[in-house]
Every structure is written in structure tokens, then in C-alpha cells.
Image (tube, rainbow, N blue to C red):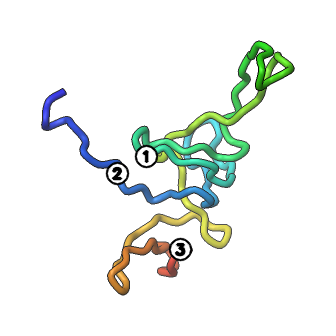
Amino acid sequence: MSIATQKRFAPKLKIRKGDTVMVITGEYRGKSGKVLEVYPKDNKALVQGIRIMSRHTKPNAQEQKGGIIKKEAPIHISNLMLMVGGNTTRVGRKVEEGKSIRIAKTTGEAIK
């Protein structure tokens, strides 16, 4: 890997764990859910109730029953948009009192 393509730090994402997001493109367009986990290195997020996949498993010590387990799969961050007050909004950053905070572009209010 060359130095030019090497990433030193994970990117600062506009979506965090606990946010409510809406899918803006793809198969799940129009659906919304809560972010369960964010993967900054992959630019993906796990959203509750979105992109449910079936996983075939064997019985083992942790899972006494085998069979088909339904679970969420990660979705790319670019396909998600933050929801504030029931409406989707773009996210900006502003420095207040030496700390960087997220702001909603539509209303200008601070996000948590």
C-alpha cells in the first residue's frame, strides 16, 4: 500500500450510535430506524430493522438451537440521512466553547 492511499485516521462521520436515520436510496429507501452500531473504517452503520439477512447456523455451545437466524447487516453511510424532529436533514459542524458540535442544516439547532 502506498503512502498516498494509506489512511491514518478513521473519518469523522456525521451519524452516531443512537441517532434516528432514514434510508435515502436503494432497496430500503424510505424506511427509518435507530443506529445500533457504526463502523467508521468501513463507512457503514447497523440500523435496527433495515437490511435484515438470514443466517444459517449450526447448534453450538452458545446457540443451543441451530437453524435460520434473522439479523441486521451493515448499510453504507452514504445511503443514510439523519432525522431531526421527524424530518431528514444534512449535518454540519460548528465549534462552540472549544468543542465541535453537530448542527442540523435545515433548522440550525444543535444535535444532542
**Mark 2 closeness class: few <14, some 14–19, many ≥20 residues within 10 Å:** few
- Image spot of residue 39 (x, y percent): 48, 43
Find disc 1 in the rendering and name its residue.
Answer: 40
Left or right of residue 63: residue 100: left
Reading the image, the residue beneath label 3 is 111
N-term-proximal mark, 1 vs 2: 2
Q: In this view, does 73 lie to the left or right of 5?
A: right
Quick check: 56 above or below 86?
above
Quarter placement of the C terminus: bottom right
SS under mark 1:
loop
Task: Name the residue at the left extreme.
Answer: 3
Furthest-front residue in view? 61
Rounded to the nearest whole Å, what is the CA distance between mark 1 and mark 2? 6 Å
Q: Does the residue at mark 1 contact the one at mark 2 (Cβ under 8 Å)?
A: yes
Measure the alpha-carbon separation of dots 3 and 2.
19 Å
Q: Determine the residue positioned at 65% across, 72% down.
A: 85
Position of 3 with respect to 31 (left or right) is left
The tag earlier along the polypeptide, 1 or 3, is 1
Q: Residues within 10 Å of mark 3 (few under 14, many from 20)?
A: few
**What's the residue type where badge 2 is placed?**
Pro
48 to 93, vertically: above or below: above
